[in-house]
Amino acid sequence: FSRIREGDTHFTVEHLVAAVEGRLRRLQTDRIDLYQLHWPDRNVPMFGGTAYVHDPDEVATPPEETLRALEDLVQSGKVLHVGLSNETPWGTMRFLLASEHLGLPRVQTVQNAYSLLNRTFEDGLAEIALREDCGLLAYSPLAMGLLSGKYEGGRTYPEGARLTLFRRFGRYSGARGLAASERYVQIARDAGLDPAQMALAWVNQRPFLTSNLIGATTLDQLRTDLGSAQVTLSDDVLAALEAVHAEVPNPCP
């Protein structure tokens, strides 16, 4: 898949066409199977924020205009399907309704952060995903590595780790997130499971999931991540995970 994210992200015809053409050149291909709009081009909570702050003067592209631009790209064969990323329930439904009422390309997926430490997708988007057949592509399922167990016991982050490079990931370094992650890791160890595989298997078992987007920097990490596809969590493990969530909900939104 590909996505628009660099520079000016207003989803107008001009910007979308330029972004797709540039992406096709860089990928050295003639078609993008799934093209996602990386961030809404309006004000939304991000990077740990949860409260919406309305700006009556902001300039945002109407979903209808964006979908018409994407329709041209679909009809030209340059894009096969379209999706959203980091989108809200309101924004997702606006796109779905616009496509339904005007016969425009339908949004197929929503790529949002989702993990044991961030279940905010469940607050409104889970129902949309299931009722509207618009599935979740879950990114950061290991919460920047916290759920792998490699940072438990107060271990320091290695040089070059994303948690140390970008301030916007600071929410993963907070006391609540670290404490909750250690409890989740301990549940895995008590059950004889690899912590990363347990966290990924939990995401895999969610009914609204379309794909779990894993990341790895070594072959061993990749093997561990892929092995999660063979793990089915027991009712006891699932209940233990829910108990932690009830006490420490969404420490890293």
Image (cartoon, helix red, strand yellow):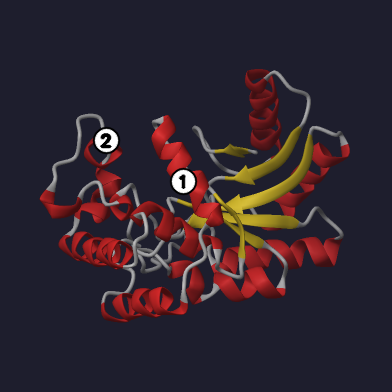
Left or right of residue 161, residue 69 in this image? right
Q: Which residue in the structure is indicated by mark 1?
A: 225
| Quadrant position of residue 115 | bottom left
Q: Nearer the viewer, residue 177 or 73?
A: 177
Left or right of residue 194, residue 122 in this image? right
- Residue 224 against residue 54 in the figure, above or below: above
Which numbered circle lies on residue 161? 2
Q: Where is residue 36 in the image (x, y as percent from the top left)?
A: 63, 45
Q: Residue at x 38, y 65 (%)?
A: 116
- Tag 1: residue type? Asp
Structural distance between the alpha carbons of marks 1 and 2: 19 Å
Q: Residue at x 36, y 67 (%)?
A: 50
Left or right of residue 26, residue 213 in this image? left
Left or right of residue 49, residue 24 in this image? right
Of marks 1 and 2, which one's residue comes earlier in the chain?
Answer: 2
Q: Is any atom of residue 204 visible in this view?
A: yes
* Crowding near the residue tagged with mark 2, few <14, some 14–19, many ≥20 C-alpha atoms within 10 Å: few
Q: Quadrant of the C terminus?
A: bottom left
Q: Residue at x 70, y 75 (%)?
A: 131
Badge 2 marks a residue whose secondary structure is loop
Which numbered circle lies on residue 82? none
- Residue 198 against residue 9 in the figure, above or below: below
Task: Please identify, in this view, whether the residue under mark 1 or under mark 2 is nearer the observer.
Answer: 1
Q: Position of residue 133 (x, y in %)?
A: 72, 67
Q: Nearer the viewer, residue 240 or 167?
A: 240
Please state the total of marks drawn on the protein image. Answer: 2
- Tag 2: residue type? Ala
Q: Is any atom of residue 138 visible in this view?
A: no
Q: Which of 65 and 71 is in front in this view?
A: 71
Badge 1 marks a residue whose secondary structure is helix
Q: Position of residue 234 (x, y in %)?
A: 46, 73
